[in-house]
Amino acid sequence: MSDKDSLSRRTFLKATGGTAGAVAIAGCGDSGNGNGNGNGNGNGDDDTPTATPEDETVYTTEAPKAQEAWETVENNPGPDAEDIRTEAFVEIEEAVRDDMVLLPLYHELTEWFWYDWVDMPKFGSLGIHRLQHNTTTVDTSSDEKDENVLVMINGTMSTIDPIRSDDTASGRVIQQMYENLVNYINGNPEIENQLADSIEVSDDGLTYTFNLKQGVTFHGGGEMTAADVKYSMRRLAESPNSVRANFVLDSGFLGVEHETDDEGNVVPDSLALEVVDDYTLEMTIQTPQPAALDILAYDAFGVMPEGYVGDVEGYDGEVTADEINNEAENGTGPFEFEEWASADFAEVTAYGDYHGDGPELDGIRWSIIEDDNAHQTAYLERNLDLFTIPTSFYNPDNVDAEEDDQGRDAGTYGPLENGDTVNYLGVPTLSVFYVAFNVPQVPKAVRQSVAYVTHHQELIDQVFKGRGAPAFSFTPPGMWPTGPDGYNQWVDNWPYSRNETDRESATQTLNDAGFTADEPFDMTLTTYDSEVFQEFGRLTRDKLDGTGISLELETAPFNTLISRGEEGDLEFYSLGWIWSWVDPAYGLFGFEPENTDTSTMPAETDGYYLDWQVGLEGSDE
């Protein structure tokens, strides 16, 4: 894989990530329905698989197929190779399915609720974490509001540094403080200029000229210039703290021209970024990339002043890497950092010299709540202005909404238990929530047996209360590489008794591998700290009882899931992935087996927590 095995590699994003996910980050995603927080990744100690009862392991794996398919994607980045990439995307999905390293559960309908004293823009299919609240208002004449501050709910955050963000909880806050050259404004799936005034692209599609807005100031003082944009992109590519260097360097992403050293690491200040003048920056990429502007809209490309952090060669920095991670923000957005108490809240205040409209609010406060009961109490006591409703307390009959021209359901929800009727927006987002396995810790027969007993439609109807669509692939149907007909054929060919609880096939598969009711495989499922995923766990445990699997259940906060995943300390776990732009590669990169090696996360690899790389040597279980 040449320089792809180096620090510069950090292959495709994941999460999204989600995730994932991510995922994700920013890319990787947390559930807007209070079902949990998401992003995926992977892990493993070595290439030694878990022993079967006979202490003899037969190795079968689809990892080489997935690895080859991903390399095909990377080696064929141009618009003329779309058909080649399409075939490779499907092959990755096939490998994931046939090895059952990850079981998709549902594609989410994201639903948010708010009281009448709030007036805000609607968000689009790329998610509320992209909603910038500069034009949001709250009615302080209301009896319920005595301060001009929007109070929202959020999941556990990991950072306020754009280059370290790979989860949507962090992304919601970063989006208010930092801005990009371009963005999906308010989550609508159309790229718009943000810090760029205009953009020119050369006839060969390789050189982008960004003409910057003038008069944009940083929160810490000073006008934004092209040198700041270059530094911010250099930091994303070169800093050891970056988790998204591949977005700049790899051909599957931007693929900015650069030099590498003998070990494959990017040579400092070798990116093909030229500061033409204070307000003009040129960027040259290796091959045409139709999604170049979409990639630049990702949170990690947020702009900060040149030399602000000393983690790039040639700069001493005004603040340390730890400070930028936790408190020392310096962006151009409508709000600036105030405070972040890790498990309790985050707060930003209005930036008075913002270059755009507003902000109309004095500030925003995010209450970090993951327990469903505390979550419900907060909105019923009107301590949240904008919130989700945990599925365990959700009643689909309370929705009174009509579909708008973007396919969103807009209307009201009520009554709540306190008698209030609130505003409602339901948006089909590009997302997937799933359970996944650490491959060397969980044998293939066990993974496949979980799929056999998973009744997707039953989950949607009984557990998730209709808040989504059954997922039989990681990639959402609206992005399926071969279109709607191809996706329908994919679903028809699902090999694990689609929409059935097939205990017979699960038991036979386990018995063939030597696992029985008397000598079962012991496994722990770690889910979000959320009642709905706990219910999923209990249902799955009961279905597997007596088949040859003994399932224990545990819960963990989202940031704990991520850190344990990166440490290879999850056998069987729930996460999710939310797409930051419309491209199957943005999610499928996380399945490249070499990128799922948790022993090198998060510095060198950023795939899903699968440790699928063991399968490249012929051993995956």
Image: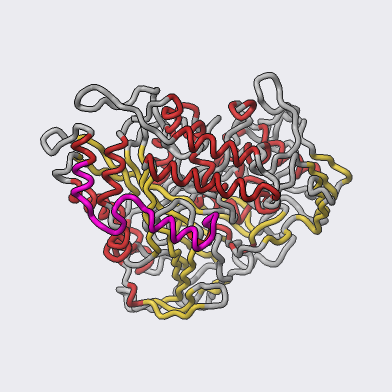
Q: Nearer the viewer, residue 189 or 439?
A: 439
The residue depicted at 56 percent of the width and 67 percent of the height is 123
The residue depicted at 36 percent of the width and 54 percent of the height is 105
Q: Quadrant of the N terminus?
A: top right
Residue 62 vertical placement versus 166 (above, below):
above
Relative image position of residue 595 (x, y in whole percent): 51, 34
Magenta residues, start to end: 480-508
Left or right of 581? Residue 222 is right
Which of the 4 quarters of the picture holds residue 3?
Answer: top right
Which of the 4 quarters of the picture holds residue 130?
Answer: bottom right
Visible residue check, residue 340: no
Left or right of 201? Residue 126 is left
Relative image position of residue 346 (x, y in whole percent): 50, 52
The residue depicted at 32 percent of the width and 68 percent of the height is 394
Q: Nearer the viewer, residue 6 or 528?
A: 6
Relative image position of residue 56 (x, y in whole percent): 25, 22
The residue depicted at 33 percent of the width and 30 percent of the height is 621
Relative image position of residue 371 (x, y in whole percent): 33, 54
Residue 353 vertical placement versus 612 (above, below):
below
Q: Single out the residue that lies furthest toward the left.
A: 518
